[in-house]
Image (tube, rainbow, N blue to C red):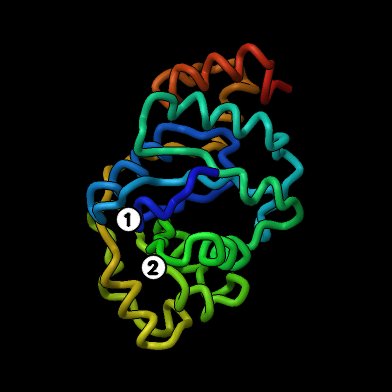
Amino acid sequence: MEDLAANNRIGILGGTFNPVHMGHLILAQDAMEHFELGRILFMPCSRPPHKPDRDLLPAEHRIAMLEAAIEGDLRFQVSRMETDRDGISFTIDTARELHRLHPAAEITFILGADSLLELHLWKDVHELLALCRFVTFTRPGAEYASLQEADLHLPASSQERLKSCIRIGHTADISSTDIRYRVAEGLAIRYLVHPAVEMYIAEHSLYRR
């Protein structure tokens, strides 16, 4: 992976990316602009800890689609840190490794609103919150600013930091689950994924029944 020390504001967008879609790319761009990040690493997981992986494509396919989707955009790059590590992908392990390799970097993990409410379930969450900043994007009209300690199940000090980093992002109601369903049913996915991803899925006959 490229040396990150040259730019100390690094955003991390993790997930299965099964497949990557336009919503992921929009979220990354929003994060770049709202938090003045130097670059964003798309971090595909090996195996997610809280989701069944029976439909999860091999990492090489997911990485290839990510690389196709962001080709030519120098703000973005793909990291193999979690897929090379194999096993269940815990964010705390990634945070520790990033800090070990790049101690001067300011690491920012990018979340959707649903993930914020589940954050208290993440492994070693208190250490994780001490190591990294977490920023959350939500839809217009959502009342996340009024979240209480009971909603987040975290100490008040952590709650305030998290709430201060909530922003309204561009609405893109797209999911990888729906894209897989549409491919399996022979429906169009144009405009939901990058054209290069659409081509890759077709060329490799992915997600078909």
Q: Amino acid at mark 2?
A: Arg
Where residue 133 is drawn, which disc sits there? 2
Nearer to me, 7 or 25: 7
Q: Quadrant of the N terminus?
A: top right
Residue 62: % across, % down: 62, 33
Nearer to me, 202 or 109: 109
Dot 2: element: strand
Residue at image mark 1? 138
Dot 1: element: strand
Q: Amino acid at mark 1?
A: Thr
Residue 8 in the image: above or below residue 165: above
**Quadrant position of residue 136:** bottom left
**Quadrant position of residue 199:** top right
Q: Earlier in the sequence, mark 2 or mark 1?
A: 2
- Select label 2 or label 1 by which is in front: 2
For label 2, the crowd category at 10 Å Cα-Cα, with few meaning under 14, some 14 to 19 and many 20 or more, is some
For label 1, the crowd category at 10 Å Cα-Cα, with few meaning under 14, some 14 to 19 and many 20 or more, is many
**Is residue 94 found left or right of 194 in the rendered image?**
right
